Image (spheres, rainbow, N blue to C red):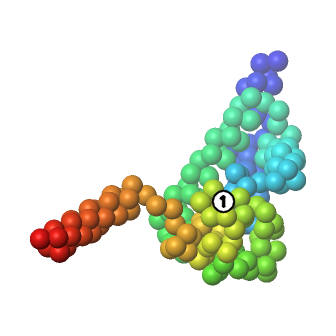
Amino acid sequence: MSEDLLHAGVSLADKAVRTVAVYLTVAVLLRIAGKRGIAQLNNFDFVVMLLMSNVVQNAIIGPDNSLVGGLAGVVILVAFNAVVVRFAAEVPMVGKIVEGGPIVLAQDGHYIRSALRRMGLRQADVDVSIQLRGGTSVADTSVVRLEPGGAVLVRLRPEEEPAERGDLAEMRVRLDRIERKLDALAARNGS
């Protein structure tokens, strides 16, 4: 039993090559498949992610069922991911290749159907993001974009933007000014 725990079935170099190869392959496949983030996965995407993790497990650890081999695979995977993420953050061109750029899904209150189709998104999915931002429909938007990380950015038309405390405070100051001017006019006309 202790043999299975501590003796790796394959060399560390073999495990490193396997892990990096699987990581890069899965990253490329996910990049090709689309930009939806974890929060926007539908049920089918979730099933694929679960099954994919099981499918690639053997490709990473090989014929190695040892504890040391499994832990080495995890350490290599996390370390390589950290390197890729930091490198993409430091070198904008690499970040653009790894994550891509934003995709405009709607412009000036109208969906761009070809973009929705290309990203595998339904209008209903995007409508939820619009409603969370305070709009009622795509007609209320100036632009809706799918960001590289998978978030949906919604910019409402200025007249559809909800009022904020600063807006209300400014409105109150203006109304006070108008009231004072009206009071002054009434006092002048009344005397």
Q: Quadrant of the C terminus?
A: bottom left
Number of numbered discs on residues: 1
**Residue 32 vs residue 152: left or right?**
right
> In the image, what residue type sits under mark 1?
Gln
- Please give the name of the residue rendered at 31% of the width and 64% of the height, measured from the top-left corner: 175
Q: Nearer the viewer, residue 40 or 164?
A: 164
Q: From the image, tell me which residue sits under label 1.
A: 131
Relative image position of residue 40 (x, y in whole percent): 73, 55
Q: Is residue 150 visible?
A: no
Give the quarter of the image for residue 112.
bottom right
Give the quarter of the image for residue 84.
bottom right
**Residue 4 vs residue 80: left or right?**
right
Relative image position of residue 85 (x, y in whole percent): 56, 57
In the displayed structure, 176 sits above or below 156; it is above
Relative image position of residue 172 (x, y in whole percent): 32, 60
**Residue 167 vs residue 100: left or right?**
left
In the displayed structure, 14 sits above or below 188; it is above
Give the structural element (helix, strand or loop) at label 1. helix
- Please give the name of the residue rendered at 67% of the width and 64% of the height, measured from the top-left corner: 136
Q: Determine crowd level at label 1: few under 14, some 14-19, many 20+ residues with C-alpha closer than 10 A.
A: some
Q: Quadrant of the N terminus?
A: top right
Which residue is situated farthest in the front direction here?
191
Relative image position of residue 111 (x, y in whole percent): 73, 77
Which residue is situated farthest in the left direction here?
191
Q: Is residue 141 visible?
A: yes
In the displayed structure, 84 sits above or below 115; it is above
- Please give the name of the residue rendered at 66% of the width and 59% of the height, measured from the top-left corner: 131
Q: Nearer the viewer, residue 3 or 38?
A: 38
Q: Nearer the viewer, residue 136 or 101?
A: 136
